[in-house]
Amino acid sequence: MAKFEVKNKQVLFKNYVEGFPKESDMIVTDASTIRLKVPADAPNSVLLKNLYLSCDPVTRIRMRKPGDETSSYFTPYAPGSPLSGYGVGEVVDSGHPDFKEGDLVWGTTKWEHYTLITQSESLHKIQHADVPLSYYTGILGMPGMTAYAGFNEVCSPKKGEYVFISAASGAVGQLVGQLAKLLGCYVVGSAGSKEKVDLLKNKLNFDEAFNYKEEHDLTAALKRYFPEGIDIYFENVGGKFLDAVLLNMRVHGRIAVCGMISQYNLEKPEGVTNLMCLVYKRIHMQGFTVRDYYHLYPRYLDYILPCIREGKVIYLEDIAEGLDNGPSALVGLFSGRNVGKQLVSISHHQGRPRRRSKAEQPG
C-alpha cells in the first residue's frame, strides 16, 4: 500500500455523560488526516486499518467524569478524543518485529478508520481466518474469554447443575449458556423481548428463557423456572435482578459478577437488600475481570474453534455498517436494541474466502 496521507474518519467523544448516553454525546468527523506509515519517532509502533469495532457496555463507564470509583480501573475518555475499545484490524505498516504488513490482529484500537498503535502488547495476532473475522470482537475476543473464564474458572461448574444467565442474548451471555449446555447443565436465560427469548430457546439451545419485562415479580419468576433453586448465576444486570436471584440460590451456589448494566446510567446505584443470603446459603459471589485470564486464551481457542467449525456453538451478531452508524449502535446497547453481539463494520478485508461452519452449510 502506498505510504501517503489520507483522511481519517473518527468518532470523537464530546463531553462527560450523565444518565443514558445519546448519539449527540459523540461527533463523527473526517477532519483528521493520517500518514499511512509508522513515524520515525515511534519505531516499534503498528499502523492499523480498522475492519470491525466492538460495542461494549464498558464504554458507558468510560464516559463518566474522572474522579469516581471506576476511574482507577477504567480510564475515562478525554473530550475531543476518539473513542477507544476492542476491534479487528489489518496491519498497514509496522516497525514492530512481531507484526508485518497484511497481518490481521484484534485488540485495543480507536474508533476511526486508521489507528497508530504504540503499545503493541494490546494486540493479538489472528492465526485462524477460516471463521468470520468479526468473531474476534466477540466469541473469539474479549467477550468470549469473559464467558469462558467467568463460567469455568469462577463458577467451577459441574454436570447437571442449574444455571441462570441474565442478559442472556448479549455478547457474553449467549456463549455462557451454550458452554453450560455442552457441559450438561440445565440453563435458563432472561432477555428483553419475545424475539430474543425465541432465539435463546430455539437457536441457542437454552432449556428455558423468559422476557423479564413481562414479569412483575422476578423472585416468583425465578422460582417458577428453578423450583429446586439456582446453582450458578452469571450476573450481567445487577440491581433488582441480583436481589431476586439471591433468594433463589441453592446452598453453596456460585455467582460470577461479570457486569451490572442496569446500574451504569444511574447517578446513584440501586441497593441490594438480600445479601444475608450469602451467609445463610454459603454462596460464593465473586467479581472478575477478563484481564486476569488472558493467559488462558490459547487453551480457550483450542476448545472453542472446533465447536464453531462443527456447529456445536452458534454466535449471534448484530452488525452496523459504517462508522457513521457507530454512535447509534453503541447507544442502542443500553435500550436492548441489539440482538446478539453488537459491532460496527467499517471496512471489509479482501482476503481469502472463509470456510463455512457446519451450522452455516446450506440445507
Image (cartoon, rainbow, N blue to C red):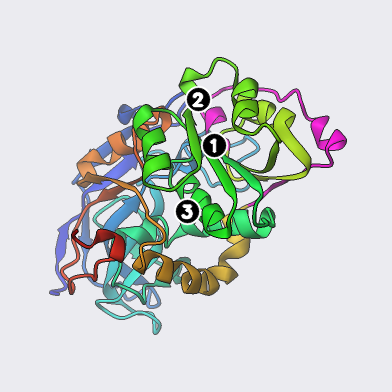
User: Which element carries disc 1, helix, strand or loop?
Assistant: loop
Residue interval drawn in magenta: 260-288
Instruction: Decide: is 4 above or below 146.
Output: below
User: Mark 2 or 1 closer to N-term?
Assistant: 1
User: Do the numbered discs 2 and 1 sit on residues whose CB atoms are within 8 Å?
Assistant: yes
Which quadrant, please, contains the N terminus?
bottom left
The residue at which mark 3 appears reads as 143
Question: Of the residues shown, which amino acid type is indicated by label 2?
Answer: Tyr
Residue 325, x across and y down, in percent = 23, 39
Question: Of the residues shown, which amino acid type is indicated by label 1?
Answer: Ser
> Is 233 or 90 nearer to us in this picture?
233
Residue 6, x across and y down, in percent = 15, 60
User: Which element carries disc 3, helix, strand or loop?
Assistant: helix
The residue at which mark 1 appears reads as 166
Residue 251, x across and y down, in percent = 80, 41
Instruction: Decide: is 156 above or below 13.
Output: below
Question: Closer to the camera: disc 2 or disc 3?
Answer: 2
> Is 226 or 102 nearer to us in this picture?
226
User: Mark 2 or 3 closer to N-term?
Assistant: 3
Graded by Cα atoms within 10 Å as few (under 14), some (14 to 19) or many (20 or more), the crowding at tag 3 reads many
